[in-house]
Image (cartoon, helix red, strand yellow):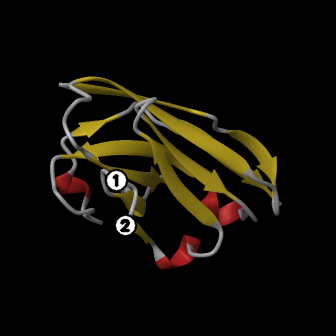
Amino acid sequence: QVQLVESGGGLVQAGGSLSLSCAASGRTSSRYVMGWFRQAPGKEREFVATINWSGSITTYADFVKGRFTISRDNAKNTVYLQMNNLKPVDTAVYYCGASGRVVGSVRKDDYAYWGQGTQVTVSS
């Protein structure tokens, strides 16, 4: 079992930045692929970014490319999502997930563990 706890959400004006963190505990010795997803009210949970165990391979949704950066510090069992130039459409609950896959996945069904989410609200 892996427990995930997200933090760093909040309210920010359009054009601003936020940095999300996801701390893992439990079976963190396993080499999990990590991903960030988000879910706006009334919408499906959608893929944002994913990173492999070593951090050498990252994948982003088209709508965040050039604005968001995913990274990880395995010594701290933590994954980060740096979000710059935020837009009102980025408003959502952001979730991190852990997957036992070797490479990252954009499919939420490939992630076995999820955190409770952190709210990000971007005002215009």
Mark 2 falls on what kind of element?
Answer: loop
Let me know if residue 40 appears in the view. Answer: no
Task: State how far apart marks 2 and 1 are (Cα).
Answer: 8 Å
Amino acid type of disc 1? Ser
In the depicted structure, whether residue 16 falls above or below residue 93: below
**In this rendering, position of residue 15 left or right of residue 99:** right
In the depicted structure, whether residue 41 falls above or below residue 98: below
**Identity of the residue drawn at 62% across and 60% down:** 90
- Quarter of the figure that contains the N terminus: top left
Amino acid type of disc 2? Ile
Let me know if residue 7 appears in the view. Answer: yes
Q: Residues within 10 Å of mark 1 (few under 14, many from 20)?
A: few
Mark 1 falls on what kind of element?
Answer: loop
**Identity of the residue drawn at 63% across and 53% down:** 82
Q: Which residue is mark 1?
A: 54
Residue at the extreme top: 26
Residue 103 is marked as none
Q: Which residue is mark 2?
A: 57
